[in-house]
Image (cartoon, helix red, strand yellow):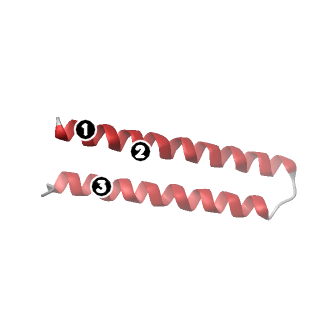
Amino acid sequence: MLDAAARRRDTETVEVAHALAAARCAARLAGLGTGEFVVRELLLSVIHEINRAETAVARLVSTSSRDVVA
C-alpha cells in the first residue's frame, strides 16, 4: 500500500507527463501552421527541450523508486 506522500508524488509525476505531452502537441501543431523557417526551428527546439525534460523526469522517478525499495 502506498503512503500519502508516494501517491502525491505519483500524481504530480503524471501531471508533469501530461503537461509535457500537451506542450509537445501544441508546438507540433503550431509548427504545422507556419511556413516560416525561423518559427519552425524555434518550435523544433521547444520540442527537443520538452523531450529532455520528460527524460529527466523519468530518471528522477526511476531513482526515487529505487530509493524507496532500498
Which of the two labelled residues, at mark 2 and mark 1, occupies the earlier sequence position? 2
Disc 2 + disc 1, Cβ < 8 Å? no
Disc 2/disc 1 C-alpha distance (Å) = 12 Å
**Residue 63 spot, x, y in % from top left:** 31, 37
10 and 39: which one is in front?
Answer: 10
* Picture layout, residue 43 above or below residue 34: above
Image side of residue 17 versus residue 26, left or right: left
The three-letter amino acid code for the residue at tag 1 is: Arg
Residue at x-position 43% and y-position 54%: 16
The residue positioned 51% from the left and 43% from the top of the image is 53
Of marks 1 and 3, which one's residue comes earlier in the chain? 3
What amino acid type should be assigned to the residue bearing mark 2? Ala
Q: Which residue is mark 3?
A: 10
The reply, left or right, for residue 33 in relation to residue 7 is right
The tally of labels here is 3
Say what secondary structure mark 2 lies in: helix
Please tell me whether mark 1 sits on a helix, a strand or a loop: helix
The residue that label 1 is drawn on is 66
The residue wearing badge 2 is 58
Per the image, label 3 sits on a secondary structure element best described as helix
At label 3, which amino acid type do we have? Asp
